[in-house]
Image (spheres, rainbow, N blue to C red):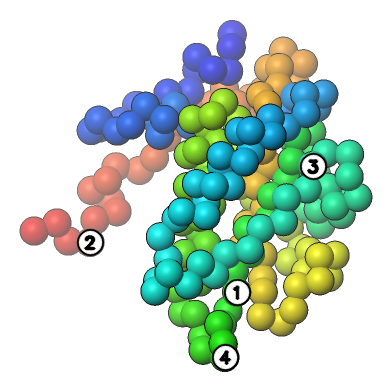
């Protein structure tokens, strides 16, 4: 069974194919280098995400597998994430700046999340696979990459070529094959008048 055929979302209303087909894999091909053109397109999409007053509070760390930067990021991940994310062709940190010219950027984390979302959608459209992680040591990343007090990692994203389901450990296979679910939209709506 191919991973690419088991994951289309069962949506209640039509959405773009690139959104319905995207999922967060934990199975990356540990041999295939990152597709540099696809990565560049994903970063360009992130660059064009909207932000409050066009402040663009996001900053990125891109660390390709085999580099010291990649090793530092893998070391900053929580144990379970280390077990699979190290195989990704690259790890990307999305960090948010808290202020600009001494003025607080109250929407910085939200805007950085939009940049990560744009990156994710473009990466998938370009044939890459991604998985965002919250399980990491924020201080270790800041120290490794010289973040000042004004910059903090929001998420770390594994990105790369999809790996083989057959070669993945059983625990990862089970997670990959589990049905994709979301709560009904009605459960998220506070008002819909």
Q: Does 163 sit above or below residue 16?
A: above
Residue 151 appears in which quarter of the rendering?
A: bottom right
Nearer to us of marks 2 and 3 is 3
Q: Secondary structure at mark 2?
A: loop
| Marks 2 & 4, CB-CB < 8 Å contact | no
Checking the image for residue 97, the label placed there is 1
| Marks 3 & 1, CB-CB < 8 Å contact | no
Seen at 66% across and 80% down, the residue is 150
Residue placed under numbered mark 4 in the picture: 102
x, y percent for residue 168: 75, 21
Residue 10 appears in which quarter of the rendering?
A: top left
Checking the image for residue 149, the label placed there is none
Checking the image for residue 64, the label placed there is 3
Checking the image for residue 190, the label placed there is 2
Of mark 2 and mark 1, the one earlier in the sequence is 1
Q: Secondary structure at mark 3?
A: strand
Of mark 3 and mark 1, the one earlier in the sequence is 3
The N terminus, quarter of image: top right
Of mark 4 and mark 3, the one earlier in the sequence is 3
Seen at 39% across and 74% down, the residue is 53
Q: Residues within 10 Å of mark 1 (few under 14, many from 20)?
A: many
Of mark 2 and mark 4, the one earlier in the sequence is 4
Q: Please indicate whether residue 136 sits to the left or right of residue 6 in the image.
A: right
Seen at 8% across and 58% down, the residue is 193
Viewer-side residue, 178 vs 93: 93
Q: Does 64 sit above or below residue 115?
A: above
x, y percent for residue 85: 75, 40
| Marks 2 & 3, CB-CB < 8 Å contact | no
Q: Secondary structure at mark 1?
A: strand
């Amino acid at each position: 069974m191919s991973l690419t055929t088991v994951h289309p979302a069962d949506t209640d209303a039509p959405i773009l194919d690139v959104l319905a087909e995207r999922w967060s894999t934990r199975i990356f091909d540990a041999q295939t280098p990152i597709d540099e053109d696809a990565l560049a397109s994903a970063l360009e999409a992130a660059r064009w995400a909207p932000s409050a007053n066009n402040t663009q509070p996001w900053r990125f760390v891109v660390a390709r597998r085999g580099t010291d930067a990649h090793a530092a990021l893998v070391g900053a991940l929580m144990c379970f994430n280390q077990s699979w994310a190290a195989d990704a062709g690259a790890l990307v940190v999305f960090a948010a700046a808290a202020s600009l010219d001494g003025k607080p950027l109250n929407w910085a984390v939200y805007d950085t999340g939009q940049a990560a979302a744009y990156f994710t959608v473009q990466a998938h459209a370009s044939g890459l696979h991604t998985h965002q992680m919250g399980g990491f040591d924020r201080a270790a990343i800041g120290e490794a990459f010289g973040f000042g007090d004004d910059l903090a990692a929001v998420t770390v994203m594994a990105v790369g070529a999809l790996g083989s389901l057959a070669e993945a450990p059983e625990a990862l296979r089970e997670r990959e094959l589990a049905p994709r679910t979301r709560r009904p939209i009605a459960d998220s709506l506070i008002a819909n008048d």
